[in-house]
């Protein structure tokens, strides 16, 4: 592979100069970092736990369950869940307040069924 990038226009493709696409990659990476800048180690811990547990059990997770499993105060977990949800793209809670999807998995049935190498199956958000 020669690390070239082709741009498609109609039925034609044209090579994009390396210097241009590399600048874009760097710019996008810095924006992605900025989008997660609000996250503390506890935010990452909660998000990682919720993703793995939804994949494991396939059901929405109540905040109390998350707090107990991670040995964090329930009030702190509630704040973290609110902050993750407000940043649209990390997780979503159902009407009961349980987390029913955490990117990239969901407890809801979708057209995207993932089969993990552990044998578990989970729907993708």
Image: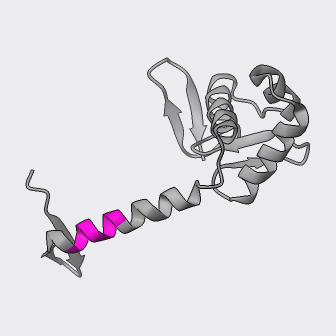
Residue 21 belongs to magenta span: yes
**Left or right: 12 with respect to 69?**
left
Residue 98 visible from this viewpoint: no
| Image quarter of residue 96 | top right
Q: Position of residue 5 (x, y in %)?
A: 18, 65
**Left or right: 96 with respect to 23?**
right
Eyeballing the image, is 12 above or below 120?
below
Residue at the top extreme of this rendering = 118
Residue at image coords 70%, 35%: 46
Most foreground residue, 22 or 11: 22
| Image quarter of residue 52 | top right
Residue 44 visible from this viewpoint: yes
The residue range painted magenta reads 20-26
Most foreground residue, 68 or 99: 68
Residue 19 belongs to magenta span: no
Q: Position of residue 44 (x, y in %)?
A: 63, 39
Q: Position of residue 116 (x, y in %)?
A: 48, 26
Q: Position of residue 33 (x, y in %)?
A: 50, 56
């Amino acid at each position: 592979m020669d690390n070239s990038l082709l741009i498609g226009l109609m039925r034609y493709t044209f090579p994009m100069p390396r210097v241009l696409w590399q600048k874009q990659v760097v710019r996008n990476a810095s924006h992605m970092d900025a989008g997660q800048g609000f996250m503390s180690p506890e935010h990452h811990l909660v998000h990682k736990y919720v993703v793995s547990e939804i994949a494991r059990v396939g059901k929405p997770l109540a905040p109390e369950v998350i707090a107990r499993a991670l040995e964090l105060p329930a009030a702190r977990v509630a704040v973290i869940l609110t902050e993750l949800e407000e940043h649209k793209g990390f997780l979503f809670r159902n009407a009961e307040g349980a987390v029913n999807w955490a990117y990239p998995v969901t407890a809801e049935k979708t057209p995207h069924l993932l089969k993990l190498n552990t044998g578990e199956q989970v729907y993708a958000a």
